[in-house]
Image (cartoon, rainbow, N blue to C red):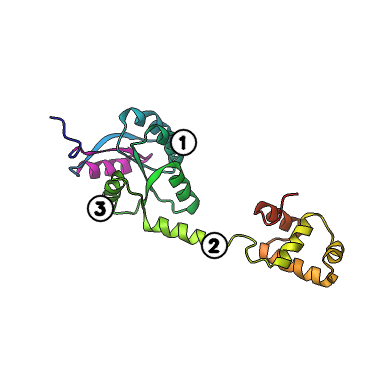
Amino acid sequence: MTPSPATAPIRIFLVDDHPMIRCGLAAMIDGEDDFALVGEAASGDEAVARIPPLKPDVVLMDLVMPGTDGITAIERLQPGLPGTRFVVLTSLVEPGEIRRAIKAGASGYLLKNATSQELITVLRETHAGRRVLAPEATDAIIAASQQPSPGADLTQRERELLVLMSRGMSNQQIANELSIALPTVKFHITNILGKLHADNRTEAVLLALKHKLVPPA
């Protein structure tokens, strides 16, 4: 007898390049009455090939794998599987990778040091439509967002000098343009190099352009 939608198990697909990890995860899934393992893949490429016909409810995806990585696999799969939730299970706590995974369509981000019960809870929560991030992942994103951007501590006068430097002006030309003494110009430039962690004027200007501290030439 086919179970009703209310009692149908959560259909899960595993993706990890380590056989022992897949074996452990499979045993955990088999131990839950409301879970059903519908398939496994050992690489991102294999996942992209095998998952679409199965239309699992949740895909548990490793990130670092040979060939296609986990995030790229999610990017390829997600548009064609609107009803599938993707949960990343990884050892990486890198803010850029976490943001990239979420942008790709991941609903969950969990570390491999999580307990079985934590993983079970995340699978159920994401299947129910909620986004769940490991505390370490949330902390990493918050810490990264609190780091000041390069040039954030430049004064208005230093920004003015930086614009003139980007135009190729010499110290004397800057002094004439701003009607300030040459030693003052040198003092400001020393401060600019220190705040941008630049070794010379050229590097300072390149950093200023990269981080949009000055208008493009």
Mark 3: which secondary structure? helix
What quarter of the picture does the N terminus occupy? top left
- Magenta segment includes 146: no
| 78 relative to 11 in the view: left or right | right
Counting from the top left corner in percent of width and height, residue 51 is at 35, 31
- For the residue pair 8 and 44, the one nearer the viewer reads as 8
The kind of residue on which mark 3 rests is: Gln
* Residue 36 locus on image (x, y percent): 23, 38
Three-letter amino acid code at the position of disc 2: Gln
Q: Which mark is residue 38?
A: none
Residue stretch in magenta:
8-31
Q: Amino acid at mark 1?
A: Thr
Q: Tell me, yes or no, whether the highlighted magenta stretch contains residue 30.
A: yes
The image quarter containing residue 43 is: top left
x and y percentages locating residue 131 in the rendered image: 35, 49
Cα separation, mark 3 vs mark 2, equals 34 Å
Pointer 3 or 2: first along the chain: 3
Secondary structure beneath dot 1 equals loop
Instruction: Identify which residue, 37 or 121, lies in the foreground.
Output: 121
Q: Residue at x 40, y 58 (%)?
A: 136
Which residue matches tag 1? 68
At x 73%, y 56%, the residue is 205
Q: Which tag, 3 or 1, sits closer to the chain's start?
A: 1
> Which residue lies under the disc numbered 2?
147
Q: Can you see residue 200?
A: no
Q: Are marks 3 and 2 in contact (CB under 8 Å)?
A: no
Q: CA distance from mark 3 to mark 1?
A: 29 Å
Q: Earlier in the sequence, mark 1 or mark 2?
A: 1
Q: Residues within 10 Å of mark 3 (few under 14, many from 20)?
A: few
